[in-house]
Amino acid sequence: MKWMATILGYAYWPLLYFAVYLPFIVPRLDQWKYIPFWIPGLEIIGFIVVLAALGMSSSHKSILFHAFGISLFLQVSIFAMSRLHMPSFLKSFEGGFLPDAILPVLLLGTIIAVLGEAGHFVVALKRRTFNKTADATG
């Protein structure tokens, strides 16, 4: 489970881009005035669940490492997509890789770490509750 949550944490956004956005959203963009709110809402909720699963099966050190790894991987993949002139990335990083990309890496890494720690906290809380009920009954 740990390795699957880790791989999915890294591959979530590129996988969603190629499996959902390109085949289902891009062909309908000329028909829609805007993308329905429930689509990005489900995408974000899915990412939160993946990060919580990553945090549930990882140590604090591993969560921090993977949080900034996922964030850096996402920025590099955005840069690669803009260089390949993929839809919705055509104007990203027009002048090349900017040093300004460091701030989004740090901010997103912090958010990912917090969400991973939330998953870790849920597991720790569950263990504490289970141990207290086991002590009370046993």
Image: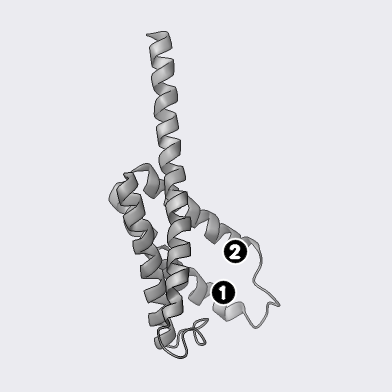
Query: Image height check: is 42 above or below 100?
Result: above
The image shows residue 6 at horizontal and vertical percentages of 33, 55
The image shows residue 38 at horizontal and vertical percentages of 63, 61
Sequence order check, earlier mark of 1 and 2: 1
Residue 37 numbered tag? none
**Circle 2: element type:** helix
**Circle 1: element type:** helix
* Amino acid at dot 1: Ile
Residue 120 can be seen in this image: yes
* Amino acid at dot 2: Ile
Which residue is nearer to you in this view: 59 or 17?
Answer: 59
The residue to which callout 2 is attached is: 39
Furthest residue toward left = 3
The residue to which callout 1 is attached is: 25
Do residues under tags 1 and 2 come within 8 Å of each other at their CB atoms? Answer: yes
Report the number of numbered marks. Answer: 2
Point 68% across, 77% down: residue: 32
Which residue is nearer to you in this view: 29 or 8?
Answer: 8
Furthest residue toward right = 33
Residue 19 can be seen in this image: no
Point 45% across, 24% down: residue: 129
The image shows residue 50 at horizontal and vertical percentages of 43, 52
Q: Is residue 119 left or right of residue 34?
A: left
Point 54% across, 73% down: residue: 24
